[in-house]
Image: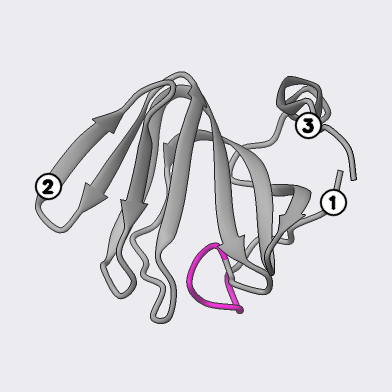
């Protein structure tokens, strides 16, 4: 139990598309990640996908629609929807996913989620 400083956690790594677990919440991983460029289109069959932009701007592509998401804004992708986040410039994001959920929707292509 205790507080987590997200800026301090984000300062511990420079890689993109590499989520790091910073806390546990009701069977979920709370993670921070840096985005730049585009992530592949993917979906999650059994869970929604939660994004909270902390700094910068991401664009969420869902189907034919692209939605800019800025600091302090949340975007939730419903389960089963094919989507991809992307960012022209570096963007810092908080993610919440069930423990064990692969970030790519596929365990074979998922990033490791180290705890920091």
The relative height of residue 44 versus residue 3 in the rendered view (above or below) is below
Q: Is residue 97 left or right of residue 60?
A: right
Report the residue at 69% width, 36% height from top: 15
Q: Nearer the viewer, residue 95 or 85?
A: 95
Binning the other alpha carbons within 10 Å of mark 1 as few (below 14), some (14 to 19) or many (20 upward) gives few
Query: Which quarter of the figure is the C terminus placed in?
Result: top right
Q: Determine whether label 3 and label 2 are within 8 Å by CB.
A: no
- Distance from the alpha carbon under mark 3 to that under mark 2: 31 Å
Res 69 → quadrant: top left
The relative height of residue 114 versus residue 45 in the rendered view (above or below) is above
Q: Main secondary structure of the magenta part?
A: loop
Q: Position of residue 109 (x, y in %)?
A: 58, 70
Q: Position of residue 32 (x, y in %)?
A: 65, 40
Binning the other alpha carbons within 10 Å of mark 3 as few (below 14), some (14 to 19) or many (20 upward) gives some
Name the residue tied to disc 2: 65
Name the residue tied to disc 1: 115
Q: Which residues are magenta?
A: 103-109
Question: Does 35 lie within the magenta span?
Answer: no
Report the residue at 12% width, 47% height from top: 65
Q: Position of residue 98 (x, y in %)?
A: 60, 69
Between circles 3 and 1, the one closer to the viewer is 1
Name the residue tied to disc 3: 13
State which tag comes first along the sequence, 3 or 1.
3
- Distance from the alpha carbon under mark 2 to that under mark 1: 33 Å
- Distance from the alpha carbon under mark 3 to that under mark 1: 12 Å
State which tag comes first along the sequence, 2 or 1.
2
Binning the other alpha carbons within 10 Å of mark 2 as few (below 14), some (14 to 19) or many (20 upward) gives few
State which tag comes first along the sequence, 3 or 2.
3
- Helix or strand or loop: what does disc 2 sit on? strand
Report the residue at 83% width, 28% height from top: 12
- Helix or strand or loop: what does disc 3 sit on? loop
Q: Position of residue 26 (x, y in %)?
A: 68, 65
């Amino acid at each position: 139990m205790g507080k987590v400083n997200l800026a301090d956690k984000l300062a511990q790594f420079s890689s993109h598309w590499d989520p790091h677990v910073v806390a546990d919440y009701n069977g979920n991983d709370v993670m921070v990640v840096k985005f730049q460029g585009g992530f592949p289109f993917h979906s999650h069959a059994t869970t929604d996908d939660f994004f909270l932009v902390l700094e910068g701007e991401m664009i969420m592509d869902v189907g034919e629609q692209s939605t800019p998401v800025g600091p302090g804004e949340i975007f939730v992708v419903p389960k089963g929807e094919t989507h991809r986040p992307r960012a022209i410039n570096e963007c810092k994001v908080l993610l919440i996913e069930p423990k064990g959920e692969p970030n790519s929707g596929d365990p074979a292509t998922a990033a490791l989620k180290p705890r920091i």
